[in-house]
Image (spheres, rainbow, N blue to C red):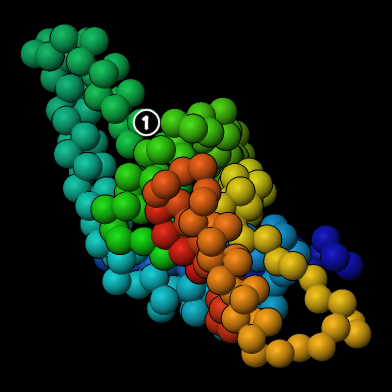
């Protein structure tokens, strides 16, 4: 039953993401909303799927849209250059196509960290994009594995042709995103504050609560990476910044 619940939730998230990607310029916010709920599913913390998805979508809309448009420019330029090289093999040297393709792959590897970071930690756009590069370099094996995960839908289409289209349509974004969440979740946990359990018979006071909050903030500020700090979970569900739990 738990497995069926995960499958149903992934299907719902995938359909929501596809619908929210239709205007094109909203793809960044759609991916932020997707990673927002998929991280919860990966950690078995999910609640209301649709409500949580749109909370992540709306909360990250402005910054995620700007980040997406910036990367879209990079993808468009590199993609167009690669197209020209492939269409004019006698004009451009062969090694140039390899260089452009490698640059496109590197940009994609950086790109895949942007929206998980955006939805989980509070940062400026420049900092989020810088941290996506740092995360990729500091966790290079994970970054490569995440890039390979995104190739699953393409492999299915190449192997199964149109017969696997319903599967790709229902899980082509959410299933790779869910696997990604399982890969980057341990990395994010290093920058998230640890919750201190309160004994059942311990008296609660506002002063003690404030002291706990300050201790959590001080601990997060002393993180190994000066560009990544986090703050405690809020009532609603962002590595230089605060935890947007």
Whole-percent x and y of residue 228? 45, 51
At 87% across and 77% down in the image, what residue appears?
199
- The reply to whether residue 34 is visible in this rendering is no
Image-quadrant location for residue 111:
top left
Looking at the image, is 82 positioned above or below residue 176?
A: above
Looking at the image, is 112 positioned above or below residue 95?
A: below
At 22% across and 52% down in the image, what residue appears?
70
Q: Is residue 178 left or right of residue 29?
A: right
Mark 1 nearby-residue class (10 Å; few <14, some 14–19, many ≥20): some
* Residue extending furthest toward the left: 91
Q: Nearer the viewer, residue 105 or 242?
A: 242
Q: Is residue 189 left or right of residue 98?
A: right
At 29% across and 27% down in the image, what residue appears?
103
Looking at the image, is 27 positioned above or below residue 61?
A: above
Whole-percent x and y of residue 43? 72, 60
Q: Which residue is mark 1?
A: 105
Whole-percent x and y of residue 55? 49, 79
Whole-percent x and y of residue 108? 38, 39
Image-quadrant location for residue 30:
bottom left
Q: Secondary structure at mark 1?
A: helix
Q: Nearer the viewer, residue 173 or 154?
A: 173
Q: Is residue 189 left or right of residue 203?
A: left
Q: How many marks?
A: 1
Q: Is residue 40 left or right of residue 155?
A: right
Q: Quadrant of the C terminus?
A: bottom right
At 83% across and 61% down in the image, what residue appears?
3
Q: Quadrant of the N terminus?
A: bottom right
Looking at the image, is 94 positioned above or below residue 217?
A: above
- The reply to whether residue 189 is visible in this rendering is yes
């Amino acid at each position: 039953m738990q497995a069926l619940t995960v499958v149903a939730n992934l299907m719902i998230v995938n359909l929501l993401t596809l619908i929210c990607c239709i205007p094109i310029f909203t793809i960044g916010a759609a991916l932020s909303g997707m990673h927002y709920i998929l991280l919860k599913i990966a950690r078995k913390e999910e609640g209301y799927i649709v409500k949580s998805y749109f909370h992540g979508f709306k909360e990250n809309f402005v910054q995620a849209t700007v980040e997406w448009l910036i990367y879209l420019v990079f993808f468009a330029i590199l993609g167009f250059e690669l197209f020209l090289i492939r269409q004019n093999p006698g004009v451009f040297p062969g090694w140039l196509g390899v260089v452009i393709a490698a640059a496109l792959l590197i940009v994609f590897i950086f790109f895949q960290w942007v929206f998980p970071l955006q939805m989980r930690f509070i940062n400026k756009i420049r900092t989020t994009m810088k941290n996506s590069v740092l995360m990729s370099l500091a966790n290079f094996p994970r970054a490569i594995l995440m890039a390979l995960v995104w190739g699953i839908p393409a492999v299915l289409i190449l192997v199964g042709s149109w017969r696997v289209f319903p599967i790709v349509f229902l899980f082509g974004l959410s299933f790779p995103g869910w696997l990604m969440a399982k890969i980057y979740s341990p990395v994010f946990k290093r920058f998230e504050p640890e919750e201190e359990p309160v004994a059942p018979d311990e008296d609660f006071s506002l002063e003690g609560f404030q002291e706990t909050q300050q201790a959590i903030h001080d601990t997060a500020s002393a993180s190994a990476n000066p560009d990544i700090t986090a703050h405690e979970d809020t009532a609603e569900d962002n590595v230089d910044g605060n935890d947007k739990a």
